[in-house]
Image (cartoon, coloured by chain):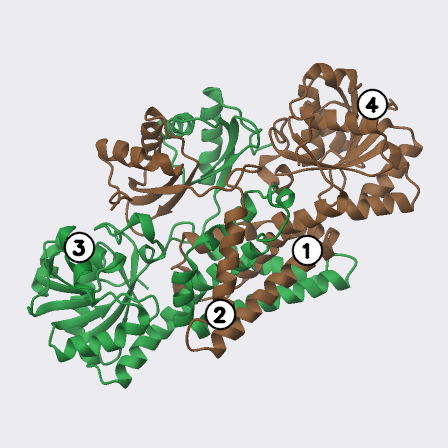
Chain colours: A green, B brown
Amino acid sequence: MLSEHAGEPAARRDRLALKRVTVIGTGLIGTSVALAMRRAGAEVLLIDRDPAVARLAADLGAGTPWSGESADVAVLAVPPSAVAATLLDAQERGLAAAYTDVASVKGPPLAEAARIGCDLRVFVGGHPLGGSERSGPLAARPGLFDGRPWVLCPAEAADPLVVDGVTGLVTGCGATPVVMDAAAHDKAMALVSHAPHVVSAAMAARFADAPDGMVGLTGQGARDVTRIAGGAPSLWREILAANAHPVADVIEAVADDLARAAAALRAHAGPPAPVTDLLERGVAGHDRIPVKRGAPAARLATVTVIVADRPGELALILQAAGVAGINIEDIAIEHLQGRPVGVAELSVAPESAPDLIAELRTRGWSLPDPPER
Amino acid sequence: MLSEHAGEPAARRDRLALKRVTVIGTGLIGTSVALAMRRAGAEVLLIDRDPAVARLAADLGAGTPWSGESADVAVLAVPPSAVAATLLDAQERGLAAAYTDVASVKGPPLAEAARIGCDLRVFVGGHPLGGSERSGPLAARPGLFDGRPWVLCPAEAADPLVVDGVTGLVTGCGATPVVMDAAAHDKAMALVSHAPHVVSAAMAARFADAPDGMVGLTGQGARDVTRIAGGAPSLWREILAANAHPVADVIEAVADDLARAAAALRAHAGPPAPVTDLLERGVAGHDRIPVKRGAPAARLATVTVIVADRPGELALILQAAGVAGINIEDIAIEHLQGRPVGVAELSVAPESAPDLIAELRTRGWSLPDPPER
């Protein structure tokens, strides 16, 4: 569900007093929030348990090290397990009028905060999506949240003015607020992010000890399924442990389906019913997953073209598409073994495919026969 | 293992008498083989159990309907379960001097052919990769096999001259022959193609009944893991049934890993050892999977750039990369909800990343801070 606050003008944000923001924890997300709020015109104060890290963030233009000031909103950019204790400490020191966090799991920190006596009237849990899956070389940047969903989970106790203030911070960072309760958020993340990571890892693990000759035959399909398995285990084990039960529910169901399919394949001579059933449920699930985040799922047409594997070749193709007024929604490139050419698969709206094929053929590219055959 | 026949000149193919080829079964693969061999200058004869389908292939330029001629090589482009019986029938009619097939599983048809008394001295099983995973709108085309691996599984009984002849047909179709035994082929396909499809389906199946609000939060990671789950169940259930035991071995191992991870997540408070172990094995497997098919695995650097979601914008970026002499190895596009911009992630050789970042910034694109920060 989209909040009505999406696209709020800056004037409204000022009215809600977001003039001064304190960021606690100046890692990738915290520093990006600080940079984004600086971009939005706010004064930003920086705290980190390592003062040198806070000074580094300040040197990068993210704000100034905190020295006792009280802020309108404090953003707790600390690991999920540290959210509740950090909130209690911040509230005891009177750091801000309102508080939010950016942890990728929302239920357990909220429960812990209630248990240890935090004031939940002035706290709204949050989770910016997308950016938090990236790490390392990308580093912090003010545009990290631009246009991305940012889930907010206001507890029942939350003061509506505080919810407004935190929502203003989210839109101030360029993100789109999405409101849901903490349990729904955690279940959703298990489904759309955490379980897919474990499933990808479990498939990729099968390649760890396989002979080179087999691994060398891997094509685009298996490459896609295993792509995210390259993510840092040290980061993901924390994420998974923090959302343990919702993740376990999903991967257990996946394991059950796979075990049933394996047993059916061993037991039957022909195509076994549980396998067909799983494949059909897979298509049903696939078809619901949006091509654009938040947009309704839609099938795209694929136009395949042979391209020279050299700089600039793909640009010429996309330029031709641009001239013809055709928007390329996605591109998959398959490089071809031992040859200086590749296959590019261009995803376009189905009604655009014939035009794109005609345009590219006119310009001399090698394409398959058109779909109308 | 690559065959030494890759890149064989046309003169050698002529010497091996590939002047006349009969294709049995004029579906996507059979018609594409026919078109490719016509392109290579061979006379092609067409047989299908439905004569109208063979005539259609002939009308498309794939050759002429067979009328009793004997060929140098006959290609059996029939489903795996029909290979052995089709081979016996073709040999009894003396259709060709040598025979090959294109089925995606190699062990069971070979065993069945031996059992029913086919002459295996003049048969070499084959499997063209890549093209057979596509279906529908792409349809047959002469370039379907260009630069793709085409596995050949000569049985011990096979006559070396027949192996040479079938290898010549493969290179004549533009493909790269890869020689392995039938059991190794079937295990390899289970690992690199069949099991990833089932695993993708099992993950995608979790989205079938999930609430819209959750599915709408799906990002690029889960989209990649589930992409191939959209494939036609009617096609895949046949492929899986034909390679049942090797597929069952792989998906059972994946199911075991997932079940163990789920149990560990439920049982422990902190990050449980089996989860960390699985994530680490996943990275190890991921790192072995080639970025280009057949090339050694290599990590690429990712350069992220904000692009307007409109025709031609991506072309300008790729053009800039081309001008700077930088080859884009892959592209992932993330569209942003409710906004006319998207995020493009450009994969390049790590040493090219700083140059690409500098070039794009010079031309005014919005990029994250450079990796050296």
Q: Nearer the viewer, residue A223 or A126?
A: A223
Disc 4 crowd rating (10 Å Cα; few below 14, some 14-19, many 20+) is some
Labels 1, 2: one chain = yes
Can you tell which mark lies on residue B72?
A: 4
Please identify, in this view, whether the residue under mark 2 or under mark 4 is nearer the observer: 2
Residue type at mark 3 is Leu
Can you tell which mark lies on residue B247?
A: 1
Instruction: For residue A195, say whether it is visible.
Output: yes
Can you tell which mark lies on residue A56?
A: 3
SS category of the residue bearing label 3: helix
Question: Residue B260, percent across and down?
Answer: 56, 70
Q: Label 2, on which residue?
A: B273
Residue type at mark 4 is Asp
Can you tell which mark lies on residue B78?
A: none
What distance separates the C-alpha of mark 1 from that of mark 4? 35 Å
Above or below — where is B2 with respect to A246? Answer: above
Residue type at mark 1 is Val
User: Which chain hosts label 4?
Assistant: B
